[in-house]
Amino acid sequence: MIVEDWGLIDFNEAWRRQRELSDAILHHDHPDTLVFCQHPPVITLGRNTQSGSVLASKELLGSMGVEIIEINRGGEATIHNPGQLVGYPIFHLQRTKPDLHWFLRTIEECIIDALGEFDIHAGRVDGLTGVWIEQQKKICAIGIHCSRWVTSHGFALNVANNLDLFSMIIPCGITERGVTSMQLVQGTNIDPGSVQTVIERHFRSKFSL
């Protein structure tokens, strides 16, 4: 498995590079690649986004420099902004296990186990993809796209990002639960780079790549 760190990168540029990687993996036997990055403030709308999920006007968001982008992953509306660790596993599942349910649950397991190393107890909520604190606050959103068993998009873990923007959407279409971050749970500064190192180790172990 190759790991790439794209740093702080515009969302559309990262999406373009994901498509290039997907094509290389599908047609040119490129190794499976786990990408880490962060994005400037942006709202992305997955394929299942319901009308009304964006609460703020386009004019207000535009004045704040926040773009709204419709994308081809599953799930609904979410926020990306600096301090959030984004991971894009561009994997050919026929090299491991061609099972999307297994793939999503394994990503969740990687995040849950990584959070445990920071003394943060996290888990799942039945019927809802992602990772949660006390089953009430989402700390990691997950949404993927899969074509011919090659995956793209991935997870967004709130490490030390500003959560105020989440009040401008209905995160993942869920009104009865909130969002949180590692820094908020711990009450201390957390470096996304240190979290990235731990997550990479769990990906290598659990996907046996």
Image (cartoon, helix red, strand yellow):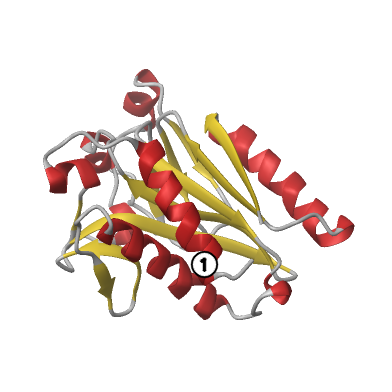
**Pick the front one: 1 or 68:** 1
Residue at image location 57% in from the left, 37% down from the top: 5
49 w.r.t. 21: above or below: below
Q: Is 56 left, or right, of 201 in this rendering?
A: left
Residue placed furthest toward the left: 187
Tag 1 secondary structure: helix
The amino acid marked with disc number 1 is Ser
One can see residue 182 in this view: yes
- Marker count (numbered): 1
**Pick the front one: 169 or 177:** 177
Residue 120 position by quadrant: bottom left
Residue placed furthest toward the top: 63
107 w.r.t. 52: above or below: below
Residue 4 position in % (x across, y down): 62, 41
**Pick the front one: 109 or 176:** 109
Residue at image location 41% in from the left, 42% down from the top: 85
Residue at image location 70% in from the left, 71% down from the top: 149
Residue 97 position by quadrant: bottom right
**Pick the front one: 135 or 6:** 6
Instruction: Report the residue marked by disc 1.
Output: 205
Residue 67 position in % (x across, y down): 46, 31
Q: Quadrant of the N terminus?
A: bottom right
